[in-house]
């Protein structure tokens, strides 16, 4: 079932028109920066393909003097690495070079294919973010488009819930639903 949903939401993202995507990405960036611009440290995915764009957000955070970390896959896990030079990683995503960071990060921003009303996300199926988020002391934020908010799936026991979801229509807070 989840495999079919992953495919469905990949297709839905693919067919989001370029003008719609550009407008939505701008609104997502505005919503995100308004909600979290006062924080100092961010672990944020480096968007690619049809994912909600993070490049403008990353640029704005850096311009504001914020600490920004990108994910790098190491074996079965992802680790935060300070923003800097990158190389293409195992999944075709640009990953940062350098030493992993092990301290606290205020906001962790994760990609998703879908998210349900309790804040559980449908990811790509590798479990990397669930493993990272388990026990992490960070605000757990998903970015995506409003159509990715759905009740088409239920969480598995290993799924880690998000605290918030940011889309072009605003910020959805799930913390009071659990």
Image (cartoon, rainbow, N blue to C red):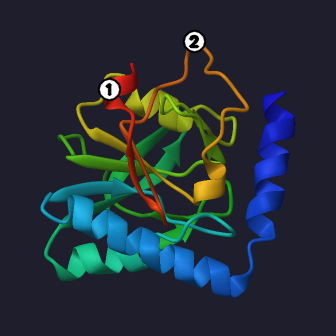
Q: Residue furthest bottom?
A: 19
| Residue in the image at 81% along x and 70% along y | 15
| Residue in the image at 65% along x and 40% along y | 150
| Residue in the image at 46% along x and 79% along y | 26
Give the image location of residue 146, x and y in percent: 58, 57
Give the image location of residue 86, x and y in percent: 47, 71
Q: In terms of depth relative to the viewer, which is nearer, 114 or 171?
A: 171
Instruction: Relative to 132, say whether 15 is above or below.
Output: below
Q: In terms of depth relative to the viewer, which is nearer, 168 or 67?
A: 168
Question: Which secondary structure lies at badge 1?
Answer: helix
In what quadrant of the picture does the C terminus appear? top left
- Cβ atoms under marks 1 and 2 closer than 8 Å: no
Mark 2: few/some/many CA within 10 Å (<14, 14-19, 20+): few
Q: In the image, which disc is placed on residue 157? A: 2
In what quadrant of the picture does the N terminus appear? top right
Q: Quadrant of residue 51?
A: bottom right
Name the residue carrying label 1: 176
Q: Is residue 3 left or right of residue 154?
A: right
Tell me which numbered mark, 1 or 2, is placed earlier along the sequence: 2
Give the image location of residue 79, x and y in percent: 40, 44
């Amino acid at each position: 079932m989840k495999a079919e949903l992953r495919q469905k939401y990949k297709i839905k993202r693919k067919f989001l028109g370029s003008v719609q995507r550009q407008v939505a990405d701008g609104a997502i960036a505005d919503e995100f920066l308004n909600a979290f611009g006062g924080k100092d440290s961010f672990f944020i995915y480096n968007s690619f393909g049809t994912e909600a764009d993070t490049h403008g957000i990353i640029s704005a955070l850096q311009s504001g003097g914020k600490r920004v970390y990108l994910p790098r896959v190491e074996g079965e896990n992802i680790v935060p690495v300070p923003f800097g030079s990158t190389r293409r990683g195992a999944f075709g995503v640009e990953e940062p070079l350098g030493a992993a960071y092990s301290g606290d990060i205020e906001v962790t921003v994760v990609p998703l294919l879908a998210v349900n009303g309790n804040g559980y996300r449908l990811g790509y199926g590798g479990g990397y973010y669930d493993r990272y988020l388990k026990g992490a002391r960070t605000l757990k934020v998903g970015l995506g488009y409003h159509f990715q908010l759905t009740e088409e799936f239920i969480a598995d026991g290993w799924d880690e819930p998000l605290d918030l979801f940011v889309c072009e229509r605003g910020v959805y807070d799930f913390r009071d639903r659990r």
